[in-house]
Image (spheres, grey):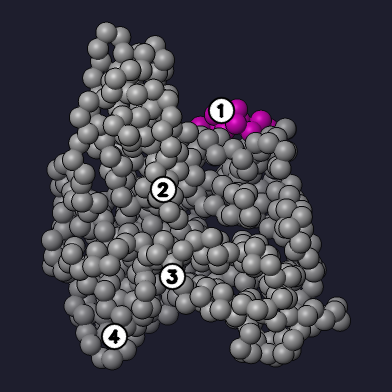
């Protein structure tokens, strides 16, 4: 997304300042100085000043949440240090600017702006390490792999870092593939995570090849061409691949899946001049694709075996709202139905219906790419099993992202989720642990899904629940849904209630059921 500068609003914090009584503990004030939007934030007796826009998608930090000496973005829950501006947690990768703050005559003023920092420059003293491998190899340049490489440099690692990835244009903003980019509202130049030469400048080598195997005994990754890459530590982050239905006609040229930037470009090219599309699967990706194709003025029909889209994940209330939203935009649903074949101009269903289709997109889920791990003798169980430190059953080999199945301290279960933000944060934690820091991965999972101008924000993880509580009415103002089991809140989904979802994330981290009950009252 574009990082357009935010408009100036509020007081001039250099000349007028902010009254000390107007800034309560944990509160923020939006202002500006020297033509730049600035947020004042108070934590205890300290007041900080940072740039007003999140460096991820320019989210309004003044509407965010202050937690200790950090501030969290309301859009996608990036977290920044108020002291240094450092991006502490993904999805933001770049720091925000900081200003010095001083108090005069009962008012807070900003003074000098601090120098801009290289996003990979270590902030202060790096943590003491128990180990520092001679070289790190990362398989996969997606969310987890690229975030890990950057964090290794941010933590002061100076040894060789090699990323192995078969795509020609990774790393890029994968969530946008089914959202704004596919809809035609995000430009090509917004998609790369970093500008040209960024990785070369920071001595991160990306090899455009595929890994064939892992020789764990010799600590080497073997590429398809036979080249061997020795490693001191290895991170597996190859992600997942789309499920492809074994149907007659699944390999026709107008049938697509969506996982890569190349896939999204191919769908866009195929949609040009077309009129009718069928999306198979009412998953988040499937419905985002449906919405994006509607924005390109195609007729769209969605086929799925469920009785209601997304009900298994979001429950009946939000599922019904998302369905109605898509129907309001012209999407036609064919539920409790399955495709039996794909013809040149139609998708034929098991109920005998024939849906006209110039374009077909299959979005029925993904499978983790665990073949390399299994071949190397790592423990695989519906993903790669890792410890709380994201280390696999083989010492020195870590896993992160869509493939990792980790012990979650919040639910007491092992889980594997396919969320962009989770993958990035796991990559960052894995990097620190490669350097011996022994940091447990305990982040609360977070994802967002975009449907036209409506965003669903979801903190936590609930595969099953015994009750759903709702505050507000989705589509008629702020609404949040809590998913609970045995009296414990597992997750909270929100629509038009961004700050409430931030509060839910923080409360889930603390295990604060009282706060969660105030956000979404049991029995509501």
Label whose residue precedes the other's in the sequence (4 or 2): 2
Q: Residue at x 24, y 51 (%)?
A: 119
Magenta residues, as a range? 509-523
Label whose residue precedes the other's in the sequence (1 or 2): 2
In this rendering, which labeled residue sits more in front, label 1 or label 3? Answer: 3
Q: Which residue is mark 3?
A: 239
Which secondary structure lies at badge 2?
loop
On the rendered structure, is 68 left or right of 316?
left
Q: Which residue is mark 4?
A: 223
The residue lying furthest to the front in this view is 35
* Mark 4–mark 1 CB contact (< 8 Å): no
SS majority, magenta: helix
The crowd level at tag 1 (other Cα within 10 Å; few <14, some 14-19, many 20+) is: few
Q: Which residue is mark 1?
A: 514
On the rendered structure, is 68 left or right of 84?
right
Q: Relative to 350, is 30 above or below?
A: above
Q: Relative to 323, is 344 above or below?
A: below
Q: Which mark is on residue 173?
A: none
Q: Which residue is mark 2?
A: 4
As measured in the structure, the alpha-carbon distance from the residue carrying label 1 to the one carrying label 3 is 37 Å
Q: Quadrant of residue 8?
A: top left
Q: For residue 311, say whether it is visible.
A: no
In this rendering, which labeled residue sits more in front, label 1 or label 2? Answer: 2
């Amino acid at each position: 997304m574009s990082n357009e500068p935010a408009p100036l609003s509020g007081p001039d914090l250099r000349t007028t300042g902010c009254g000390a009584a107007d800034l309560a503990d944990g509160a923020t004030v939006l202002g500006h100085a020297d033509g730049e939007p600035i947020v004042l934030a108070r934590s205890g007796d300290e007041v900080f000043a940072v740039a007003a826009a999140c460096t991820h998608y320019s989210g309004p930090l003044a509407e965010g949440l202050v937690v200790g000496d950090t501030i969290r973005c309301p859009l996608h829950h990036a977290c920044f240090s108020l002291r240094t501006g450092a991006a502490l947690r993904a999805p933001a990768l770049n720091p925000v600017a900081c200003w010095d703050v001083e108090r005069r005559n009962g008012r807070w003023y900003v003074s000098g702006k601090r120098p801009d920092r290289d996003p990979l420059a270590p902030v202060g003293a790096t943590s003491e390490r128990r180990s520092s491998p001679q070289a790190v190899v990362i398989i996969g340049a997606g969310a987890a792999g690229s975030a890990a490489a950057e964090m290794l440099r941010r933590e002061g690692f100076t040894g060789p870092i090699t990323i192995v990835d078969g795509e020609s244009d990774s790393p890029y903003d994968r969530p946008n593939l089914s959202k704004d980019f596919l809809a035609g509202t995000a430009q090509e130049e917004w998609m790369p995570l970093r500008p040209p030469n960024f990785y070369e400048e920071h001595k991160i080598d990306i090899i455009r090849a595929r890994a064939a195997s892992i020789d764990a005994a010799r600590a080497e990754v073997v590429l398809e061409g036979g080249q061997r890459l020795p490693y001191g530590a290895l991170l597996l982050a190859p992600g997942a691949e789309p499920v492809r239905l074994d149907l007659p006609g699944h390999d026709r040229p107008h049938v697509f899946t969506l996982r890569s930037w190349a896939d999204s470009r191919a769908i866009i090219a195929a949609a040009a001049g077309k009129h009718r599309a069928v999306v198979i699967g009412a998953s988040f990706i499937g419905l985002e694709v449906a919405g994006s194709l509607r924005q390109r003025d195609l007729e769209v029909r969605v086929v799925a075996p469920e009785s209601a889209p997304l009900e298994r994940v979001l429950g009946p209330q939000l599922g019904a709202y998302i369905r109605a939203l898509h129907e309001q935009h012209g999407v036609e649903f064919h539920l409790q139905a399955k495709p039996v074949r794909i013809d040149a101009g139609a998708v034929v269903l098991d109920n005998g219906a024939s849906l006209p289709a110039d374009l077909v997109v299959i979005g029925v889920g993904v499978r983790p790419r665990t073949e390399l791990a299994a071949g190397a003798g790592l423990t695989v169980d519906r993903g790669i099993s890792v410890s709380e430190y994201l280390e696999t059953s083989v010492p020195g080999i870590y896993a992160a992202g869509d493939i990792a199945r980790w012990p979650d301290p919040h639910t007491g279960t092992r889980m594997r989720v396919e969320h962009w933000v989770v993958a990035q944060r796991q990559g960052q934690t894995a990097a620190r642990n490669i350097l011996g820091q022994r940091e447990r991965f305990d982040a609360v999972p977070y994802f967002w899904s975009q449907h036209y101008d409506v965003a669903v924000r979801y903190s936590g993880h609930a595969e099953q629940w015994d009750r759903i509580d709702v505050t507000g009415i989705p589509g008629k103002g702020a609404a949040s849904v809590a998913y609970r089991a045995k009296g414990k809140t597992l997750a909270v989904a929100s629509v038009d209630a961004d700050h409430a979802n931030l509060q839910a994330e923080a409360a889930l981290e603390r295990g604060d059921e009282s706060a969660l009950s105030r956000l979404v009252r049991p029995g509501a």
